Amino acid sequence: MIHLLALLGTIAFVPLDDRPVSLQLPVMLGEIAGERVDTPPESLLGRYLQPGDPDAILAWLNATPRAGESFVLSSDMLAYGSLIASRVPGTSYADAYFRLRALDRLRARYPGAWIACFGTIDRLAPTGVPAGTGYFAPYPLWSYLQQYANLHDPPLPKEEAFAAKLRAEIGSTVLDQYLGVRARDLAVDRLLLGLAQSGTFDRLVLGQDDAGPVGLHVKDVRLLEALVASNDLAGKVSIEPGADELGMALVAHALARRAGWTPHVAVRYSTPSGALFQDPLEFAPISTAIDALIALAGGVRDDAHPDVVLAVRVPGTTAAEDVAFTTAMEREIAAGRSVALADLSFLRSYDDQAAFAQSILASGLAAHLDAYASWNTNANTAGTALAEAIAAGAGRRAGRYDALAHKTFTFMRFLDDYAFHDDVRPALNADLEARGIDRTLPPAPVAAALAEQNRADLWSRAQTILAQLDPGYHVAAMRITLPWARTFETKIEVGIAPRS
């Protein structure tokens, strides 16, 4: 349900791409809070390897009359056409420059608006596609590039022979193209810092897309951090791990601003050393990413007097620690606090993640959580859970909270993060592997069969999960697809309704 008052405070949102995590979930956050999140027509956003239309999106952004309260904009979509398009040659720096400078006109048109932008620092691996596709750096080239980019820069003495071997396998043409993409993207990130400094953006975040503590990206990150510090941008610009969650975090920030609320967020880890755990696809420990996400979502860290408790379950949590962890969550809920659970145990064990999800569904704890997420990188998972809880809190404080939208969001997270990624997806991938079929871009007939199997398997689990979350509701309608015709993500569109 969209409340009439929400029309006065529309959030204009340009997503990273058309995946559910990028487009569907940020829009649903607005629904939870009773606000309208306005997005470009999906036909302009592209799909997978086909980029979107940045110029048409800019025209949509500038031509549509708006209340002018909040804008949350993906620089990757506006400069290149999507996150994946940012990883390949094609868009020139000049084109990216003129597209992003068009945002100066947006600022001039809406001088009192809150304009937030999220961009990415190029990840180390190009998008993986099978051999013979005609796309940039198909297999095995993308795997050679990934290995090369993950070496120290410059390579350590013990890495030099391997680096030389990889350079020969990649070839100078493709390697130069890859390095040219990295240089272009770094120049665009520097341009974004300039736009933040000039006042075009009120808030800018640059997320380091999938990359650990070693690799070609390290110099880029250090350079950008130095520019932030030397230009006194620390209160306006952040550089942090992650990519997919950034749009959600900024939408949550816009919703909290609309409600006049600064969320106070406590973080409780499942083990005493939990804050030190590091996702292999992130350049800093999870505490760094989580603390940055709290600020990005408009909150402040407050372990003593929180509005929201972000409970973070890390890999390696023992059975005894799980008991203490769940007991602590139950205590926080009994005290009237909002509890958001981010379960990161999948980083080492899908079986562990599934067992914990089953236990909190069976015990009834899951039904009382304000948010749940348990798949993708640490930052993606924590950012999703935090954004959901803040959207709910903002809606309650503004008097526009939509409980049904909130129930729907949580149900979808359990069905996706738990049922799909722990159970259905591994089975689909095992079938592809047994037949020798690449999972990143399967042939159309295979993709159609995969989508049908995925739909049937998730449907069979949906009613059980919803009954555990809220037995007073049933699945009234549901559409399940593989939006990019691959097994990495699923899209769930569902309507739930009270039982008669």
Image (cartoon, rainbow, N blue to C red):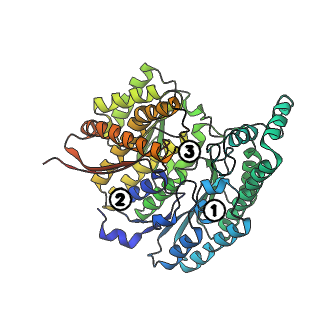
List the residue tagged with mark 3. 291
Residue 65, image x, y percentages: 45, 79
Residue at image position (47%, 74%) is 68
Q: Quadrant of residue 466?
A: top left
Q: Quadrant of residue 162?
A: top right
Dot in front, 3 or 1: 1
- Which comes sooner in the sequence, label 1 or label 2? 2
Q: Seen from this angle, which residue lies furthest left? A: 500
What is the total number of numbered labels drawn onto the structure image? 3
Q: Label 3 is placed on what type of residue?
A: Asp
Q: Label 1 is placed on what type of residue?
A: Tyr
Neighbour class for label 1 at 10 Å: few (<14), some, many (≥20)? many
Residue 3, image x, y percentages: 30, 66
Q: Secondary structure at mark 1?
A: loop
Neighbour class for label 3 at 10 Å: few (<14), some, many (≥20)? some
Q: Quadrant of residue 405?
A: bottom left
The CA distance from mark 3 to mark 1 is 29 Å
Task: Tell whether label 1 touches label 3 (CB within 8 Å).
Answer: no
Pick the quarter of the image with the N terminus.
bottom left
